[in-house]
Amino acid sequence: MNHPTDEEIVRQLVDIISDGFNRSLRSLAETGAIDVTNMRGHYCGVGSKYYDVVTEQIVLSAKCGTTSTRQLFD
């Protein structure tokens, strides 16, 4: 990926941010810092209430990060 398109950068950033979100959420739940009982019923894949909200924000963050990430390749 020497000169990725903006869309390729966004896809990579979405994957990275999603992984970080899921790992962080799992760790916070495991340590008892947060209770995700209610969320689990609505965070179960594409089309579910919380999943779509989280995904929307992750995509927005990835799009905002595209310009600065592009600088790494230019």
Image: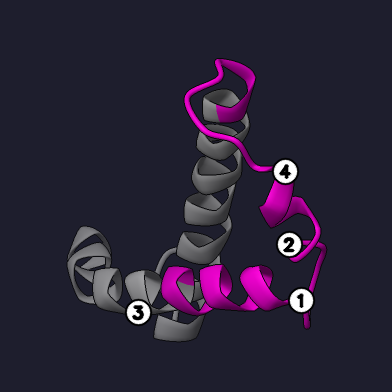
Q: Mark 2 or mark 1: which comes first in sequence?
A: 2
Left or right, 69 with reference to 50: left
Q: Classify 10 Å Cα crowding around label 2: few (below 14), some (14-19), many (20 and above).
A: some
**Mark 1 vs 3: CB contact within 8 A:** no
Secondary structure beneath label 2 = loop
3D distance between C-alphas at marks 2 and 1 = 6 Å
44 to the left or right of 50: right
x, y percentage for residue 65?
A: 27, 68
Q: Nearer the viewer, residue 66 or 49?
A: 49
Going from the N terminus, do you reach mark 4 or mark 3 first?
4
Give the structural element (helix, strand or loop) at label 4: helix
**Residue 37, numbered circle:** 4
Which numbered tag is attached to residue 63?
3
**Distance (Cα) linking label 1 and label 3:** 22 Å
Task: Establish if 73 lies above or below 66.
Answer: above
CB atoms of marks 2 and 1 within 8 Å: yes
Amino acid beneath label 4 = Thr
Q: Position of residue 52 (x, y in %)?
A: 63, 78
Q: Depth-wise, is mark 3 or mark 2 nearer the camera?
A: 2
Amino acid type, label 1? Ser
Which label was assigned to residue 48? 1
SS for tag 3? helix
Tell me where the magenta segment starts and ends, as one range.
29-58
Q: Which amino acid does label 2 sit on?
A: Tyr
Name the residue: 56% across, 72% down.
55
Q: Which of 5 and 2 is in front in this view?
A: 5
Q: Mark 2 points at which residue?
A: 43
Q: In which quarter of the image is residue 18?
A: bottom right
| C-alpha span from label 4 to label 3 | 31 Å
